[in-house]
Image: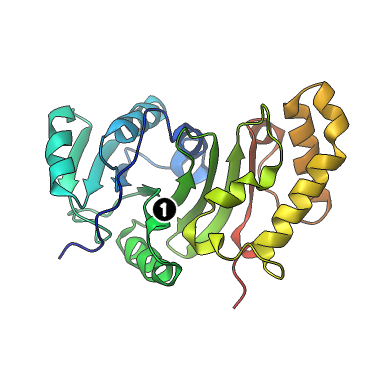
Amino acid sequence: MVVGRVTRGTTGTNRLRRSDRWLVRHPRVRAMTAPLVVDLGFGATAHTTLELADRLCAVKPGTRIVGIEIDPDRVAAAKRLETATVSFRHGGFEIPLDARPDIVRAFNVLRQYDETEVASIWSTVLSRLAPGGLFLDGTCDEIGRVSTWVALTPDGPDSLTVSLRLADLDEPSIAAERLVKALIHRNVPGENIHRFFVDLDRLWAMNAGLGSFSAIQRWVATVRAMKDLGWPVRDAQSRWRLGEITLDWDAVAPLP
């Protein structure tokens, strides 16, 4: 039985470049050999599936990518784009494959479900994931300049990443509009994610003077200050310069 329902299917060329760039450098992905990858809910067109294949195959030869969609007409249209490494299949969160995937990506999919459904969907996808695997549940704007995603392992949610185009950035909390479904309704006083954005905006404003040198220097200083403040920020400056901040999920998880 197919698990899920048809979503709007909006997509576009290069829309998921930020999460792809992050994914190919993830330690779990680096440790994989010829991974099996699922692009879950690829949408009305298969641009992002093919782009993911190009980016992963460049660093992981032998990668196989399966685009899975619940709308059979979208699958039929994508079939003509199949290659030796990319195929398309009808299905949903049950992930109808004989083998367990090493990576599952679902972008702008769960955003269209209710918050109360997220835990069950996460559990279903993780039950299909291979040991040592990675599941990305993410959301972004229409042109991929504002993105957030949760990385989950078979043990559960592991981290949250906010990735922004820094040029002309007013406030980092613009990302609140594109939070994943598990968090978007929790951006209210008293919740961890609200406290995170309050601190991030405040430190971004405090480092405004560095903007005369570059938005990148301003952002790096902001992220470093977040870490100094006690937020469990991951990675190093080389990642922060890309407009990213990744931190432990527990620090932003919804309160009971």
Q: Is residue 16 left or right of residue 186?
A: left
Task: Evaluate whether residue 251 shows in this view.
Answer: no
Q: Where the N terminus falls, by quadrant?
A: bottom left
| Residue toward you, 228 or 25 | 228
Q: Is residue 201 left or right of residue 108?
A: right
The image shows residue 129 at horizontal and vertical percentages of 34, 57
Residue at the location (36% across, 65% down)? 121
Task: Evaluate whether residue 123 shows in this view.
Answer: yes
Q: How many marks?
A: 1
- Name, please, the residue furthest toward the top: 213
Tag 1, which secondary structure?
strand
Quadrant of the image occupied by residue 190? bottom right
Quadrant of the image occupied by residue 249? bottom right
Q: Is residue 71 left or right of residue 58?
A: left
The image shows residue 239 at horizontal and vertical percentages of 64, 35
Quadrant of the image occupied by residue 248? bottom right
Tag 1 residue: 135
Indicate the amino acid at tag 1. Phe
Q: Where the C terminus falls, by quadrant?
A: bottom right
Q: Is residue 43 left or right of residue 24?
A: left
The image shows residue 228 at horizontal and vertical percentages of 83, 50
Residue at the location (71% across, 37% down)? 170
Residue at the location (37% across, 68% down)? 123
Callout 1 crowding tier (Cα within 10 Å): few <14, some 14–19, many ≥20: many
* 34 over 106 or under it: above or below: above
Q: How is the image coloured?
A: rainbow
The image shows residue 92 at horizontal and vertical percentages of 24, 57
* 3 over 240 or under it: above or below: below
* 168 over 2 or under it: above or below: above
